[in-house]
Amino acid sequence: MFRKTRSERERELDDVLRAIADHPLSSEEVRQANSLIEQLDGEDPSVVNDSLASRGLPSLDALGKMQLKHGLAFGRLHRRRYKLEKKLGRT
């Protein structure tokens, strides 16, 4: 019924940004794995898995399971961030 103040929206945005940073799909391991997968684009999946394993990173299967388990929530957080930034005039 009542509109949120700018400071309330900024606090909400800070909470969302913190949740994104703490999310499993934002972890350093996942970022490194995704970067390596991009570098090895077009390679055989076994080669990619071996490269991931040699660096102690999650396998393609583990990354896929993480995506299935956490992807929807991660997308919702980013959509919420976008909407708040738009309302605050930060986009």
Image: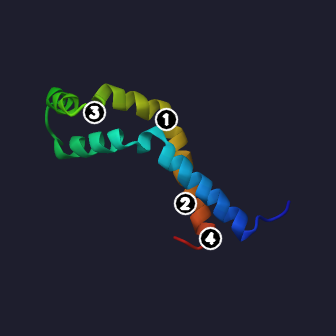
Q: Nearer the viewer, mark 4 or mark 3?
A: 3
Give how far apart the Cα atoms at labels 1 and 2 are: 19 Å
Q: Element at badge 3?
A: loop
Q: Earlier in the sequence, mark 3 or mark 1?
A: 3
Q: Residues within 10 Å of mark 4 (few under 14, many from 20)?
A: some
| Residue 21 sits above or below residue 68 on the image | below
* Disc 4 secondary structure class: loop
Q: How far from the left and from the top, in percent, is residue 43?
A: 13, 36
Direction from residue 43 to residue 86 in the image, left or right: right
The residue identified by callout 3 is 57
- Residue appearing at x 14%, y 30% in the figure: 47
In space, the residues marked 4 and 2 are separated at their CA atoms by 10 Å
For disc 1, the marked residue is 70
Left or right of residue 82, residue 10 in this image: right
The residue drawn where x is 22% and y is 32% is 52
Residue type indicated by callout 2: Tyr
Residue position marked by numbered label 2 in the rendering: 82
Instruction: Name the N-terminal-most of marks 4 and 2.
Output: 2
